[in-house]
Amino acid sequence: MAAYITDLDVSTNAAEEQNLQSKHFLKINVNLNQGTKGNKVYLWYKTDGPQPITRVQLSYDNAMAGGLINSGYTKINEDLNAGAGGNYIYLWYFRGSGEYDTPIVEITFSTNAEQDARMFADGREELACDLNRKAGGDWIYMLVKRSEQTYVCDVTATDSFSLDHTLFQEGYIRLDEDTNRGARGRDVYIWYRQTTDSKRAITDLQVSINDAEYQQYQQQKYTPVSVNLNEGTNSAYKVYLWYNKQPGGKPINAIMLLLQKDAVTAYKKAGVTVIEKDLNAGNKGQLEYICYNQ
């Protein structure tokens, strides 16, 4: 079994690379600014510390940081978009030992849709924020592998940052991309929590974008996430996420947001279930689909 990852750091220039190398960090050889004119940015890690890292998050907005700080996450104070002109993106990590914390043993990066889809379908968990967010450049996503197979046991959503601290403390992981991206609505994020017990897992997800679909899933005994994923936009559509836990059903092990049209074909080809209902239905925001792997 692979060793647990216990420390993370980031370099944005040659001097920082040399410094981390002298401290015996190991480099993941993917430039996180690939395809841009920005700095060469790399993630480094160690596996010899006393406590494993169990959760990682990304922030691209100052408002996303408050809950992370108050919940004991460590910020790596290096912009993953350094010199590229996009969002200021920061990586955060947490060393936990609670019920919903499973050690991370591997971190990888994808640089195109096909590679991304294959790794997600292979059982890795993916962070929803493109590391070149608003910088152009290549598609770059971060994926993690854990010491044990985990399954999604709870999902929820928020339309403000007021509950972030509570949810992080309760073991939730935030999908770090606003479901209202480009729609000028509320800051809406989907959250999930993991378990190593497959019997507690969610077995199906659905999305409703109108009243008829809402009633349909309600009649089928699905449970809705209470927040409208379109909250605060000028759209007449109300978009809700629904989930179900069927005894004997196949457990869901990871969920993800897709924002690029070419990703849909790649993910479906890899065997990932894509719910092709736009979370920004009825407004001019970014196309967004939820997908999941079983």
Image (cartoon, rainbow, N blue to C red):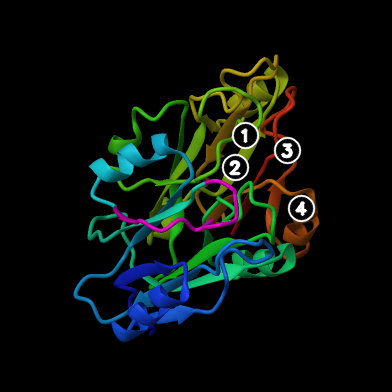
Marks 3/2: CA distance? 19 Å
Q: Secondary structure at mark 1?
A: loop
User: Which residue position is annotated with label 4?
Assistant: 264
Question: Which of the two marks, 3 or 2, is nearer to us in this view?
Answer: 3
Question: Looking at the image, is mark 2 or mark 4 nearer the viewer?
Answer: 4
Residue depicted at 56% across the width and 23% down the height: 228
Q: Which residue is mark 2?
A: 205
Q: Amino acid at mark 1?
A: Arg
Picture layout, residue 44 above or below residue 286: below
- Residue 41 vs residue 278, the one in the foreground: 41
Residue occupied by mark 1: 181
Magenta residues (range): 74-87
Q: Which is nearer the N-term, disc 3 or disc 1?
A: 1
Residue at left offset 29%, top offset 72%: 6
| Mark 2 Cα-neighbour bin, 10 Å: few <14, some 14–19, many ≥20 | many
Question: Is 137 left or right of 131, judged from the image as shown?
Answer: right
From the image, tell me which residue sits under label 3: 287
Please name the amino acid that badge 4 sits on. Answer: Val
Q: Earlier in the sequence, mark 4 or mark 1?
A: 1
Mark before the other along the chain sequence, 4 or 3: 4
Q: Position of residue 148 (x, y in %)?
A: 40, 71
Q: Percent from the top left, x then y, of residue 152?
A: 46, 52
Q: Amino acid at mark 2?
A: Leu
Cα–Cα gap, marks 3 and 1: 9 Å
Which residue is more in the foreground, 242 or 266? 266
The answer to whether marks 3 and 1 mark residues whose Cβ atoms lie closer than 8 Å is no
